[in-house]
Image: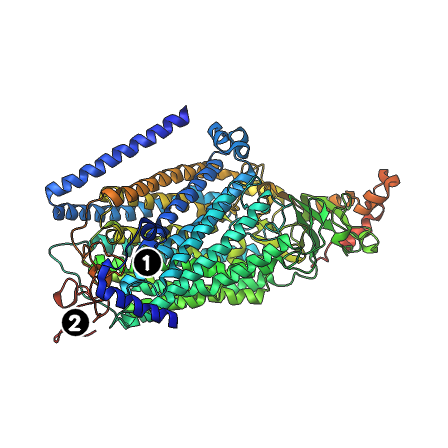
Amino acid sequence: MSVATLHHADVHGAHDTHHEHHHHETFITKYVFSQDHKMIAKQFLITGIIWAFIGGLFSVLFRLQLGYPESTFPWLEDIFGHWAAGGKLKPEFYYALVTMHGTILVFFVLTAGLSGTFANFLIPLQVGARDMASPMLNMLSYWFFFLASIIMFCSLFVQTGPASGGWTIYPPLSALGDASSGSKIGMDLWLVSMAMFIVSSLLGGLNYISTILNMRTKGMSMTRMPLTVWALFFTAVLGVLSFPVLLSGAILLLFDRNLGTSFYLSDIVVAGKILPNEGGSAILFQHLFWFLGHPEVYIILLPAMGMSSEIISVNSRKPIFGYMAMVGSMFAIAILAFLVWAHHMFVTGLNPFLGSVFVLLTLLIAVPSAIKVFNWLTTLWKGSIRFTPGMLFAIGFVSLFISGGLTGIFLGNSALDVHLHDTYFVVAHFHIVMGVASFFGMFAGVYHWFPKMFGRYLNNTMAYIHFWVTIVGAYLIFWPMHYEGLAGMPRRYFDYSNWESFKQFASLNQFISFVAMIVFAVQLLFVFNFFYSIFKGRKVTSLNPWGSNTLEWTTPLRPGHGNWPGEIPEVHRGPYDYGKDGNEFIPQTTPVGEHESHH
Amino acid sequence: MKAFLMVLLGVLIFVVIFQIAKASEYVSVLKGEEKTRRQNNRINAFLLMGLLIFGLIGVWYCNELYYGKTLFPQGSASVEGEKIDTMLYITIAITGVVFVITQILLFWFSYKYQESDNRKAFYYPHNNKLELLWTTVPAIFLTVLVVFGLKYWFKITADAPSNALVVEVTGHQFAWEFRYPGADGVLGKKNFKLTTSKNNLGVDFSDPASKDDIHLSNTMHIPVGVPIKMVIHSQDVIHDVGLPHFRLKMDAVPGIPTTQWFTPKYTTAEMKQRTGNPDFTYEIACDQLCGANHFAMRGVIIVETMEEYKKWLAEQKSEYATLFEKKEETKPVADSVAPKQTAQVLPAQK
């Protein structure tokens, strides 16, 4: 803490007198080993976009197999060689693609790409700080993520293939090279990469927490912080408390794989060999994994909630309804996130009494979630709504959060979960509520803060096409999957054509694959729009283009390292005084007037 | 060539969209940005309303198309599964109402309260009564769901009835093995270290209880109307005995045996009639990713009438006999003990 405070004083001193002329920045210090939180945010975002492209492409490839199991595509063999011999994916390769799709999107895109980008970009700007508590650790956070990325990327090219036991890497499958070719060197690389990733996440998280607690500008009390900052705060706390548990689980798995320990292994005969391991528990890993794995869902979701709250309020020209209830419900979600992990394990032979406790705690999450939904709806009510691309994605987020949240009530109830567990119902549920919804939050954030990041706008026409095709496509892809799940169709199958119970969905699978390809193509339009607009987009001319109250819009058009050239502005009010006393908006820096009404 | 043309077409569409997007930006500058913004606002508000209407029609249409393909119209094939079906209907009713109301409010508010010159935003920062209302109402509905859910959960996870017929199910990459306890009603002891290519389950054949155990692969026979208790093992990685028609699922974990039980309501033949599908089969789907051929780890359950089951059982030969009594191969062991065996292996009639 003392280091953080010292550095804080130092940054203040330096920049308050010298403004932006302090550093002699080279290309390397400005764009590569930058310690400016805004540049680090952009590094996370661009790395995240690259990973999203790879992860999305993988999903298109395995959807090709699911949609067209009878067809062959010779060009696949041209690209992937023996992994797609005869123009058809091998099951091993299919499972590798599924596994890497999950790993990449859950961790590299929706954790690092989402939190890494927006926590870095928004926390100092919105609480009124020159930079993070420790810019150095912040830089290391990105470079550990980069290292993790490189290792994971390399694992795609090893001879026995990358990890292919699912992103949840349950042992013994992930522990035994004899059980699956993906559990050979690819799995070790996966674990090492995740260890680096966790280091990155911890360095980032500790920084976000200390910045929020210690470096808020004068007048910025905790209850005057924008909901984005609150969301990113809870996200960071969740990450710091839960990622180490995954790290320990991963290290024990490395031991089981390479040092002959038996943490997760017992009574195993594989490939005709009787293994000596006895006394371990395969279920232990699932407890360790889901102790991170469930908070992870909220690590992904909370930033999207926070940003959507902010964007909905700004573009409805109304205060967010029930600010304290919004903070309180996020707090409740964050606490409950730690107490529900075993709802992923209802069919592992869990003690039924223990299961019942997890049912109760899991369904409790629906209460704060309902509060949030109704508060968003009331925020829209009697607003004066502007449909910027960011706003459309925020509204889409709410719609998806409702749709996907409600199916959580099915899955959280253990009796129903027994039928729905590991079917396409689960795939539909978590893709809607965690995958697509969080992506919508992320897109909302990118469209909303792009002008602040790059001083230019994204092209609106492409943005609108992106939104409309994505939301319609997302529902067309994932809604019908609920029916497949109700029919008990298992997830993670390479081919359903030999199953009497599931083959009736062949034409539906084809339809889903077709829509998935279109939606993927439209994401390429977004990526193009993103990179094109960085250089050629319409220039921002107004300091505060959305008429927003928060502090980031009081900085110059292209803020340098240190964010404000002069003093850091002082804050006099909460962030959501929109439409108050006949004013369209009242920035946080405006002092409270004598005759101003109180609420 | 075809792939190349497809890529070319994609690129072409991209270029067209990009040119239109660029042009629209210039047009907006010419027309006045504020005017264009207002116009876009109206178009998007209208489209959001369209999304709501077509979305709700789509949900209804999807239901028409696919509900019949789920397992629910034909009903649960197990007595216990009926509770799960009831649970599903209660949950669909409650969440369905919430879904429709909240989605309508979301898109209707978006449309109705789009920016307009005639109206200013209404400053409404909070209302504790309203917030209390939508804390307590969901809490009450969730309590209902939790109470029903747990009631059923404790019923289906309770100990199997004492008259249940025991079958041991063992999963391995990538097949299912079944073991019936034979005439003595007791399964012989196992030890994974005894596993050989012949003794593939690692049964300790020095245990007298193992002598009459019957082993089967991939196809399992059970009688209708009697509780069946599965004792589930795995030899290598985690598998899962998924029985969608019976609404059941239980992991097979190496080193930690699990159990599940159910009472089949309909024989396979009856289900063929009920579903109108002459190929109907009760399938065991592995529901836990277990390696490259996970998707092909298919088991079959044949549910028969008690008479058919008894007849089938009488024809089975014990594994011990198959392995060690080669000379008597022509004379199935089960024959000589058939009457006694069926009497004990079958659960007492209630």
Q: Nearer the viewer, mark 1 or mark 2?
A: 1
Of the residues shown, which amino acid type is indicated by label 1? His
Q: Residue at x 29, y 71 (%)?
A: A223
Give percent across and percent down for residue A330: 37, 66
Q: Give yes or no for contact between labels 1 and 2 (Cβ–Cβ under 8 Å).
A: no
Q: Total of numbered circles in the picture?
A: 2
Of the residues shown, which amino acid type is indicated by label 2? Pro
Residue A37 numbered mark, or none: 1
Are both tags, 1 and 2, on one chain? yes
Farthest residue, direction bottom = A594
Give percent across and percent down for residue B94: 40, 59
Residue A591 numbered mark, or none: 2
Q: Is residue B26 above or below residue A173?
A: above
Q: Is residue A180 above or below residue B4?
A: below
Quarter of the view holding residue A119: bottom left
Left or right: residue A10 versus residue A143 is: left
